[in-house]
Image (spheres, helix red, strand yellow):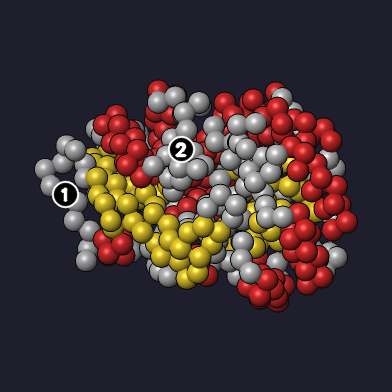
């Protein structure tokens, strides 16, 4: 089956409320959508979220990368799903994705390819990437920056909804962070798992001081406490604190993963599908972590549509259980999503894994059309792809 055309769209997804942490605050997400069409008419959609403060990718840079990838994919022909995986693997190697931080662009292309060929070959992507390890996901919740009233309201909602894990965004004053942790523990109870995420807000000494105080609230993990590039600082922290140190912004490529492992600079990886370049690279990263005795967390980027949520469910289905899962907040956060399926987390933080051809979604192409702010049509096509209005 031959790849006929590759198109890209930048869509803006408005939020129901602003979401913030120590690096950024946003009320919408600009997401990259890639559409792949095969010669039999099968169409697949992929998604990536370029965030300059995470991978260094801009929207325009990601579109340029998609154009480069598309030029090498157009006209390629594969006969089975093994060939699809090999095609993606070879492109990743050729484009230097082991060291190059182009995760969002490559993820969008990879997912679109997997979706299109899954539909063409009438097979679920999950069954082609591994063995099913679990039939549902137990998601954790996240408390963003905000005033105390909003935090308390969210905590009671999460408690009544049945979440067992809460990740609190920290990075203000230590006094404020400790007050927030006290509130989280009081509302969620002693059995809840509490994690914190500083998003690079501290230095080494501030982290050590905070970790010592956090022991009173039985904090399970501290995520990305210092600047992403300070790997030696992370190593010092790991050697001197009791909590698990999770890396996020420091972990964007396989080369990053190998350096973090070699320098004993973390206790766990936070693997976000868009950030690391898609499902195949995420699998490789998870295997590196587990072979080195590190934990694996499945993260999510704020503003993911159903496409990345579905990709996260696939990752959760085929990987051994992770320590924590994030995401699936689609209808809670987004004013509108782009699939017929609603993948929003259900009671007790549960997300069911349903197997259907491709990524298992029916994309509302008219929604993409209505939300599109910028389009990169296939450079070799005779017309601009026309999505339904």
Q: Report whether 197 appears left or right of 301.
A: right
- The residue nearer to you, when weighing 246 against 191, is 246
Mark 1 crowd level (few <14, some 14–19, many ≥20, 10 Å Cα): few
Note whether residue 224 is visible: no
Q: In which quarter of the image is the N terminus?
A: top left
- Mark 1 or mark 2, which is nearer the start of the sequence? 2
Note whether residue 144 is visible: yes
Q: Which of marks 2 and 1 is in front?
A: 2
Q: Residue at x 47, y 71 (%)?
A: 16
Marking on residue 56: 2
Q: Report whether 6 appears left or right of 275.
A: left
Question: Mark 2 to mark 1: distance in Å?
Answer: 29 Å
Q: Which residue is drawn at 51% across and 65% down?
A: 18
- The residue nearer to you, when weighing 136 against 55, is 55
Q: Count the labels in the image.
A: 2
Report the residue marked by disc 1: 384
Rendered location of residue 185, percent (x, y): 81, 66
Residue 375 to residue 364: above or below: above
Q: What element carries label 1?
A: loop
Rendered location of residue 290, percent (x, y): 71, 35
Residue 163 to residue 237: above or below: below
Rendered location of residue 110, percent (x, y): 41, 40
Task: For the residues labelled 2 and 1, say whether their Cβ atoms are less than 8 Å apart.
Answer: no
Rendered location of residue 217, percent (x, y): 84, 58
Residue 142 to residue 133: above or below: below
Q: Which residue lies furthest to the left in this view?
A: 382
Q: In which quarter of the image is the C terminus?
A: bottom left
Mark 2 crowd level (few <14, some 14–19, many ≥20, 10 Å Cα): few
Q: Report whether 304 appears left or right of 12.
A: right
Q: Is mark 2 on a helix, strand or loop?
A: loop
């Amino acid at each position: 089956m031959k790849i006929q055309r590759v198109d890209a769209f930048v869509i803006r997804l408005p939020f129901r409320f602003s979401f913030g942490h120590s690096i950024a605050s946003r009320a919408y997400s600009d997401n990259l959508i890639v559409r792949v069409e095969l010669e039999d008419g099968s169409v697949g959609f992929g998604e990536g979220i370029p965030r300059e403060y995470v991978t260094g990718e801009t929207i325009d840079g990601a579109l340029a990368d998609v154009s480069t990838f598309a030029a090498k994919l157009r006209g390629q022909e594969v006969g089975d799903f093994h060939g699809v995986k090999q095609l993606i693997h070879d492109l990743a190697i050729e484009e230097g994705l082991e060291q190059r931080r182009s995760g969002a662009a490559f993820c969008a292309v990879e997912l679109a390819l997997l979706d299109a060929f899954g539909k063409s070959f009438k097979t679920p992507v999950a069954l082609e990437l591994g063995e099913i390890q679990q039939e549902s996901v137990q998601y954790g919740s996240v408390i963003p920056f905000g005033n105390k009233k909003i935090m308390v309201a969210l905590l009671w909602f999460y408690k009544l909804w049945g979440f067992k894990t809460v990740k609190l965004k920290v990075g203000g004053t230590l006094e404020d962070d400790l007050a927030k942790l006290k509130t989280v523990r009081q509302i969620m109870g002693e059995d809840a798992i509490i994690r914190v995420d500083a998003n690079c807000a501290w230095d080494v000494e501030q982290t050590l001081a905070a970790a010592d105080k956090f022991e009173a609230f039985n904090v399970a993990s501290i995520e990305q406490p210092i600047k992403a590039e300070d790997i030696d600082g992370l190593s010092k922290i790991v050697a001197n604190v009791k909590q698990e140190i999770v890396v996020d912004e420091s972990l964007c490529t396989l080369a990053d993963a190998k350096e973090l492992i070699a320098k004993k600079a973390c206790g766990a990886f936070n693997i976000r599908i868009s950030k690391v370049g898609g499902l195949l690279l995420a699998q490789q990263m998870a295997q590196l972590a587990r072979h080195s005795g590190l934990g694996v967390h499945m993260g999510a980027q704020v503003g993911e549509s159903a496409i990345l949520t579905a990709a996260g469910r696939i990752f959760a289905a085929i990987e051994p259980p992770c320590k924590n899962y994030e995401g699936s907040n689609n209808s809670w956060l987004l004013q509108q999503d782009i699939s017929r399926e609603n993948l929003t987390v259900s009671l007790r933080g549960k997300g069911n894994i349903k197997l259907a051809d491709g990524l298992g979604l029916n994309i509302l192409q008219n929604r993409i059309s209505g939300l599109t702010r910028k389009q990169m049509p296939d450079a070799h096509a005779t017309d601009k792809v026309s999505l339904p209005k």
